[in-house]
Image (cartoon, helix red, strand yellow):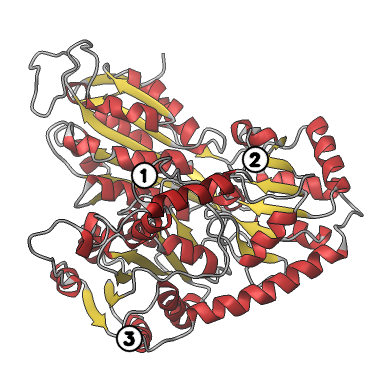
Amino acid sequence: MGKTIRLTMAQAVAHFLKKQMTVVDGKRLPIFGGVWAIFGHGNVAGIGEALYQVRDELPTYRAHNEQGMAHAAIAYAKANFRQRFMACTSSIGPGALNMVTAAGVAHVNRIPVLFLPGDIFANRAPDPVLQQIEDFGDGTVSANDAFRPVSRYFDRITRPEQIMTALKRAMQVLTDPLDCGPVTLALCQDVQAEAYDYPESFFDEHVWMTRRPRPDADELANVVALIRASERPVIIAGGGVLYSRATAELTAFAESHGVPVVVSQAGKSAIDERHPLALGSVGVTGTSAANAIAEETDLVIAVGTRCQDFTTGSWALFKNEKFKIVSLNIAAYDALKHNSQPLVADAREGLKTLSAALAGWKAPAALAEKAAKEKRVWMEAADKAMASTNAALPSDAQVIGAVARTIGREQTTTVLCAAGGLPGELHKLWPATAPGSYHMEYGFSCMGYEIAGGLGVKMAHPEREVVVMVGDGSYMMLNSELATSVMLALKLTVVLLDNRGYGCINRLQMETGGANFNNLLKDSRYEVMPEIDFRAHAESMGAIAVKVASIAELETAIVASKGNDRTTVIVIDTDPLITTEAGGHWWDVAVPEVSPRDEVNKARKNYVDARAAQRIG
């Protein structure tokens, strides 16, 4: 036997994590950017003491909310294109369950994060302990079982030696582009403190490299044949292009073969939107240019996207009878969806190989000409939507225009958002020019991600200007990491749009024939109408805060914020009903089949008519 070192299980976790490395742009770095921790019983004595011992090599950060710190960890990994990530530890019970929503965000978006919640006693001697969830029919269940459906790998550590197998499996999942996603290791609190003679070799430094599978020859031949036969192809670029760091290869492919590029929410910034072949967002929140090309396409070349309903207009966007789809994806699970012709491969390697196999082939010139014409029409509409205004209540688009004009066009700016009406407007209108300059959590569309996510992006790229755009509804759900950003001296610029309620869902409610009910504050059941002073609230958490009364004042405040030394919150009142009319597409939201309201019955008829265009299967 080799040499051993006696450590507690929790100490073994800490020492192992600090030895995991990666290489980014030729530089060797720790793969874990740190650990987020809110301590309580179940992790303070075990993992807390262990993290203290390695605090100089593996930094621990204190947050204010477990969900918030997990969102920050997710955004950190997303901003690093999954090359680096973080861990999160909590107590048992409520602390652990607060992270489950964030685990759902990570799972849907295929983002690596390591969850280390405390768990019940493996020896069961003091059961039931404080905060323990008891299953009356299964003595092995704890609150942490809620992580199972939102984890790519789950394990409960009931003996100290089990952690060796579990951590190696965890690292494989966290670093594998195919399996990538959240890992949960539930650490029984008594086992955290138990010692074991671990092999010293377990703590050897390990460098994790990116695996890049290349296409299968038969799949490649089938895809090449489909592309060569197509007359109106279009590329849909997804988040996989960014995670593979394949943006240059995407642009080169489009240029070599004359194929227009449209983007999903996750794929926005995969191509510089100033490029003549870049038509912007596609689908429900798509530009008129992208959707015009997509409606007529006979072949979608989907690269690194799972083609969810917002991207495909609930599969009613594509109108060409000859329509087919090719899916270049590292995951066969995604590549085989919707009768696609799969090309299972890394996006970067797949694009290079596919382009070489298509040497000499180019889409008909008429396609690029139509794309250019449609883009000109769209850009005129977008400029009109974002133009400055003297209106007392500007639209979301006009606020976006102000941010874009003052700070958004800088190469060192990242704009971040997550839920509500803003993602749709940003998807259409934001001028994404560099990879990672647009950061949207729209796989799970999780309200409350915004400020915590901004913090995670700033941790990943402290040199960047990080602009968080958030509505009052999301701000009220989770704003605590605003204080964390001040404490960590990680400056954010937060533009808070106050439309006094859930404006996006109110509009959807109206579109489906519903009465204005329980979304805007004025339509909700309150004895006293709330008047929330967001400026004062942000200021109370240490931020610099200002409320502006116009687009002109907003632009002045944004310029001034560049010189501020800490997080700045700029509040502006907006209109809850106005959205950009140009672009967009139908979205399948089921309307009641019967109703006493004429508005609902009319909406139902429109819904049935729209569904007739859906491609099923």
Relative to 379, 49 lies left or right:
left
Alpha-carbon span between mark 3 and mark 1:
42 Å
Amino acid on which disc 1 is placed: Ser
Classify mark 1: residues with Cα within 10 Å, few (<14), some (14-19) or many (20+): few
The picture places residue 388, in percent across and down from the top left corner, at 44, 86
Q: Nearer the viewer, residue 394 or 615?
A: 615
Instruction: Name which of mark 3 and mark 2 comes first in the sequence.
Output: 3
The picture places residue 308, in percent across and down from the top left corner, at 55, 44
Is disc 1 placed on a helix, strand or loop?
A: loop
The picture places residue 328, in percent across and down from the top left corner, at 69, 42
Is disc 3 placed on a helix, strand or loop?
A: loop
Tag shown at residue 595: 1
Q: Is residue 40 visible?
A: yes
Q: Quadrant of the N terminus?
A: top left
**Contact between labelled residues 2 and 1, with CB atoms less than 8 Å apart:** no
Amino acid on which disc 2 is placed: Arg
Alpha-carbon span between mark 3 and mark 2:
45 Å
The residue that appears at 70% across and 70% down in the rendered structure is 374
Relative to 280, 401 lies left or right:
left
Disc 2: which residue:
615
The residue that appears at 22% across and 27% down in the rendered structure is 143
**Contact between labelled residues 2 and 3, with CB atoms less than 8 Å apart:** no
Alpha-carbon span between mark 1 and mark 2:
28 Å
Amino acid on which disc 3 is placed: Ser
Disc 3: which residue:
550
Name the front one of labels 3 and 1.
1
